[in-house]
Amino acid sequence: MVRTLRELLSDRLLLLWLVYDAMKYKTFGETKIQKLCFLSEWKMLDNHEKGFNYDFIRLTHGPYSPDVEEDVEWLENNQLVEALPINEKVNIFRETRFGRKLLKDFDSVFMRNNIFTQKIAAINRKYAPMSLQDLLSEVYSMPHPYMKGERTIGELRPRTPLLYKIETQKARVTFNITKEELATLDIYLDDENYRSVMLAGESAKRRPLLPFDEVF
Amino acid sequence: MNKVEEMRNDPIRNSIELNYDLKGKRRVRIGDYRLIYAVCLDCRQKGYTKFNQCYDCKSHNDNSIVYFDVIHRPHGYDDL
């Protein structure tokens, strides 16, 4: 399902929090992020909590969401995480100064939404220290989130849907972020736009402003 | 350009105040673009002059609007 801008921005903010929290335990790449995200969203959905808004399917390496892949790439391209290649196929993630700053600036949002961050932290504490192989085996042996008691995730056919985002009206709790915070986040998450606005602000401090007719 | 004219008449309506590093500025959506600006009266009343610190602040009257930037931000389903 297509995410709204509100959902997309909240997902990227929570994902950034997840990645930085998981870094406390072990180095990891995108496959592990996919699993940590899946497990966190599952835990939230068990309580009808709308935190992450990703749809997951079962692929070769277990639960996979194309939107998680897109968001990880976005964080990478906008200097919010740094991807270090360890071989031709695998990157591991490291924090960046701007990623750390964003998390610090939006700290009050995370405090307000600790129902979600506590769940992510609990998942990270349990699963992030595992090797990727162990984590994959663990996830493969879990039952399908909605068809409990039947086949395990590992036994499901490729592309079987596993999780999908909950609609706002069906959620007991929704990620609580104001439109002012979202509009600000929208700029923070885009490196080019953030730099451009900051540069414009600095320029206004140093020289007289141009009149309207000269600009438009 | 009509949207900009509309905004000049009522610069607060439909705009969203920004936070953190962007405190003191507002954002309005015009199609795929976001206009980042400040309204001088609003800025003075709310004490945002300490954030914006415009070089020639005193030479602008309360009705002035300071345009900082226009950013391109396409998204099919903007619910902000």
Image (tube, coloured by chain):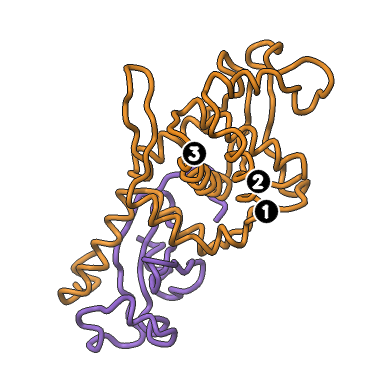
Three-letter code for the amino acid on which mark 1 is drawn? Ile
Q: Which residue is mark 2?
A: A119
Q: Nearer the viewer, residue B1 or A133?
A: A133
Report how far apart the C-alphas of labels 2 and 3 lie in the structure.
Answer: 16 Å
- Protein chain holding label 3: A
Report how far apart the C-alphas of labels 3 and 1 lie in the structure.
Answer: 21 Å
Left-right relation of A45 to B55: right
Quarter holding the N terminus of chain A is top right
Q: From the rendered image, report the letter of the chain displayed in orange.
A: A
Quadrant in the picture for residue A90: top left
Which tag, 2 or 3, sits closer to the chain's start?
3
- Protein chain holding label 1: A
Q: From the rendered image, report the letter of the chain displayed in purple.
A: B
Residue A61: x %, y % from top left: 56, 17
Q: Which residue is mark 1?
A: A115
Left-right relation of A167 to A176: right
Say which residue appears at 65% left-offset and 22% top-offset. A138
> Do marks 2 and 3 share a subunit?
yes
Q: Which residue is mark 3?
A: A25
Residue B14, placed above or below residue A145: below
Three-letter code for the amino acid on which mark 3 is drawn? Tyr
Which mark identifies residue A20? none
Three-letter code for the amino acid on which mark 2 is drawn? Lys
- Protein chain holding label 2: A
Around disc 3, counting alpha carbons within 10 Å, would you say few (fewer than 14), some (14 to 19), or many (20 or more)? some
Quarter holding the C terminus of chain A is bottom left
Residue A130: x %, y % from top left: 55, 28
Residue A33: x %, y % from top left: 51, 32
* Mark 1 residue element: helix
Residue A205: x %, y % from top left: 21, 74
Q: Nearer the viewer, residue A101 or B31?
A: A101
